[in-house]
Image (cartoon, grey):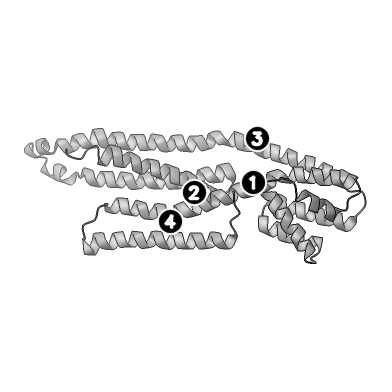
Amino acid sequence: MMRIPESEKRVTWIVSAATGMTLGLTALINALYLKAPLVLTVDELMFLALMVAIFPPAVVNLLDGRWRNAVDNAIPKFLRELSEAGRTGVTLTRAIELASRRKYGPLSGELKRIVAHLSWGLSLEEALKRFAERVNTRLARRTAILISEISRAGGEVQEILETVSRHINELQTVERERRSQIRPYITIVYIAFFIFLFVDIMLIKTFFSELEHMKGVMAEAGGMFLASALDVGKVEQVMFHITILEGFYGGLIAGKMGEGSIGAGLKHSLAMMAIGFLAFYLIVWKGIAPP
């Protein structure tokens, strides 16, 4: 797990989007004007451009989200041990320094930064404020404010820290239950996508393919207009585009429902789009190609 600063996130989005747009525009210009022979088709190149534009931001969001969750999950244990250290008569600043030597996952590194800032002469409130800005989660901000207020108020704070630790544990338990309850709805999004993909492929491989084979018969029977109007290749192209759009927006919806963030849905979008592309490539395009 690693922390991804917001500036690096923005750079990743900009570079990925620019690279994807460049690949997409190159494919369109070649298809419309240059007509140069390429190994990949226009649809395959456009899909590649879309994946290039989405994959790096999806990985960045996934890594950063895991890091933030790991920090939040360690905060209750940190507060509880902070309270236990206070019972021994240790000052709050010293208790944070001792806690930074323990294993809290990614939170340990952030505690060491707080201790380093204190050694440079910063106040505890300023060091905690910078901690909240770096982690940038609701729980981290509330924890920073809480410890700052406790430091300012002084007195017996052990009971307060223990109460807050139990309260945060309860909130995280509720959040885990909420996610477990919402998980079936994410599964429904995937099931809906698979059904949509299955229906598309079945229509192409059965209904439209049969019509394609019947073109000659239809032409002999006088249905020349209908026979010439049917283009199975165009049908495949339209259905492929719809499948990719279905996977992209379905993934965003799954991320919003499951983790409360559209950016978190990019990994679902990547998975469904890749599955859709592979299904069309292996079953539709390669499956009906002449031997």
Work out how far the residue at label 3 is from the one at label 1, CA to CA, in angstroms: 15 Å
Q: Which mark, by number, is residue 266?
A: 2
Across and down, in percent, residue 120 comes to 77, 66
Q: Amino acid at mark 4?
A: Ala
Q: For the residue labelled by badge 1, is the local secondary structure a helix, a strand or a loop? A: helix
Q: Which mark, by number, is residue 247?
A: none
Work out how far the residue at label 2 is from the one at label 3, CA to CA, in angstroms: 23 Å
Question: Along the polypeptide, which appears first: circle 4 or circle 3?
Answer: 4
Q: Amino acid at mark 2?
A: Leu
**Residue 288 or residue 117, whichever sits in front:** 117
Question: Along the polypeptide, which appears first: circle 2 or circle 4?
Answer: 4
Query: Residue, x 58% and y 56% (percent of image)?
Result: 4
**Residue 18 or residue 28, whichever sits in front:** 18
Work out how far the residue at label 2 is from the one at label 4, CA to CA, in angstroms: 11 Å
Give the mark count: 4
Query: Residue, x 31% and y 41% (percent of image)?
Result: 280
Q: Nearer the viewer, mark 4 or mark 3?
A: 4
Residue tagged 4? 53
